Image (cartoon, rainbow, N blue to C red):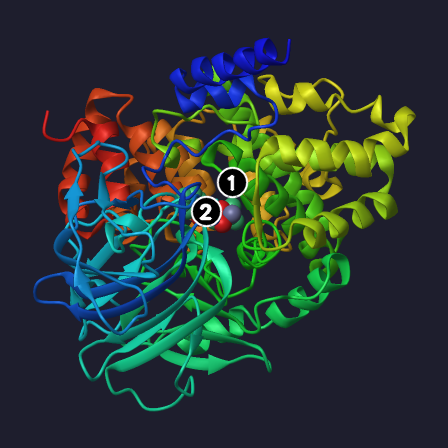
Amino acid sequence: MVEFSAMKSILATLVFALIPVSAQASMNPNTPPRDTHTFSNPQSITVTHVDLDLAVNFEKKSLEGTATLDVRRVVPGSGPLILDTRALQIGRVEASENGRAWADAKFKLGNVDQILGASLTIDVPAKVKKVRITYASSPSASGLQWLEPSMTAGKKSPFLFTQSQAIHARSWIPLQDSPKVRVTYTARIKTPADLFAVMSAENDANLEGPRDGDYTFRMRQAIPSYLIALAVGDIAFKPMSRRTGVFAEPSVVDAAAAEFNDTERMMVAAEKLYGPYRWGRYDILVLPPSFPFGGMENPRVTFATPTILAGDKSLVALVAHELAHSWSGNLVTNATWNDAWLNEGFTVYVEGRIVEAVFGVNQAKMEAVLGRQVLQENIDNLEERDETLYGQFDGRDPDDSFTQIPYEKGALFLRHLEQAFGRARFDKFLRGYFDHFGFGSITTSEFEAYLKTNLLDKDPAAAATVPVQEWIYKPGVPASAPKPQSDAFAKVEAAARPWLDGAAPASSIDAKAWSTQEWQHFLKNLPQNLGTAKMAELDAAFGFTKAGNSEIAFEWLRLSIRNEYTPAYERLEQYMVQIGRRKLIRPLYEDLVKTEAGKKLALEIYTKARPGYHPLAVGTVDAIVGWGK
Ligand code: BES
Ligand code: ZN
């Protein structure tokens, strides 16, 4: 009997071992789904610390030097260490038991996968504690952008910045590039003597102190690899409060400090809701306009696009968003990219709460209505399988998972829970969640289990009003979802009505007090085919073609493309060549290629713009315009 059951379990184990790991995960509810976007094997041997010693070579567009990794065996033995790389030149690999005596280690680069890059498999004897890799990054590294001086504000010095999320850290550091693996890091970065280096870590130098081209950094908290970040350029610093400040090129730093001087208030608001800020300083680095994102939540220093420097603080919700990631994302991290909504949905929710606390409930409501509209536009265009909060991106590029689904659908789900359980209880729940999982990386199922125990089961009547499974695993938005509303927008619609009905000229629309968001709502909701006469009338009344605000200009340029309003085309070209932020340029290319004439114009503009775009933006736009085909 005993023998028989032992036999059965051996057999079961054997059969189980033959099934691919990804399938096992979905069969066994106790095995969290594994991260399929890494070659690495942290379940056997885990990297715990990364020490970088890199020289920044602007001539060769390469980072050159060593990465020394501390490793900890999870499973005893001498199995290999597997790392992720992409287009790295590996010179030498050494291993050490004590960090003093080093011996060459055998290594092998695997075949290149278009999405994942190549594995680096290193033989490490059982007692090895450190592995040192001598390497250089490729000039076309997906996680780096090397800018000519002409692409900076100062026009005199080159600039380099990294963007590691989602799986691009591996293009500049050989490591276990999975959000489930957390590391501390230290770095020594050598740059041309007149340039300054910033990393997502504590900086050795007095922030305003001398620049000598030799900088060291330390990140004491364990973070996922996608949060390791570096920028090098003619970067100045200006403090805003005791623990906040801005980094930017010298000609930008004053404007940036003025724009963002509510950052400390945002931190205080977030701390009041979700507990202490865990990362010490919070600075914002304003990058040149080719930065492909609005913002990136690199710990201690958010990287941001200059397109939010509107001059009137109207676009600083982006800072609230990146700051919010200090809790949702950086403190509690998605374990795989299928769980991205745990980062972005929670962050959009927290962003809304910060905006509400600092700028008032009406501002937060306007942003929620705008968010609901872009979510709907997205849902109308996505395949159903891409509309679930829990994503299905195995075998696909995780960068493609960042649609409005994880962001706005995720946030709407949390607002539904807030509504059902009441703010007091939901705030307490969320704060507890950040404390409970702090400095950990979790999956959607781990969240579900925590939600059940700590919220749903405590009030079954309230829980019955929120279709949690539908939210997470079904396409679309549940019928019972909250419906964001804004009185301010209702007024905008009423004010525009007489003009739209042909009963009054555009100049009679009383828009003097409209905020950026009211303008966005107005422009977004105009009829698609307004006609050139009405476009010209609007332009004469409000000067949209010359609008300095990047979001207002964006909506106007979309309308201009749809209506073939050619007086705006010069601005269109200038905008698309100057700005590399994907959210602002991708829809313009998509709109253009819908007509033959537009496609020709798109190619003309892109020919000029492409050399200045980041590798990620190039990938996106190449596909839209059919570049090289
Ligand atoms: N973490 C994201 C940026 C990101 C996402 C980089 C996916 C790489 C892959 C960041 O927090 C973000 O969401 N930025 C938004 C701004 C925000 C206000 C919605 C952006 O860049 O537009
Ligand atoms: Zn985000």
Q: What's the mark number on residue 354?
A: none
| Disc 1 packing (10 Å; few <14; some 14–19; many ≥20) | many
* Residue pictured at 79% horizontal, 45% vertical: 429
Q: Which residue is mark 1?
A: 335
Give the vertical position of 267 relative to 43 (above or below): below
Query: Where is residue 552 drawn, in percent x and y?
Result: 47, 47
**Of marks 2 and 1, which one's residue comes earlier in the chain?**
2
Count how many numbered circles sit on residues in the image: 2
Front-lying residue, 400 or 378: 400
**Quadrant showing the C terminus:** top left
Give the vertical position of 179 relative to 12 (above or below): below
Q: Is residue 418 left or right of residue 219?
A: right
- Secondary element at image label 1: loop
Front-lying residue, 354 or 363: 354
Give the vertical position of 570 relative to 485 (above or below): below
* Residue pictured at 55% horizontal, 74% vertical: 281
Q: What's the mark number on residue 74?
A: 2
* Residue pictured at 53% horizontal, 34% vertical: 339
Front-lying residue, 377 or 544: 377
| Disc 2 packing (10 Å; few <14; some 14–19; many ≥20) | few
Query: Where is residue 253 drawn, in percent x and y?
Result: 41, 76
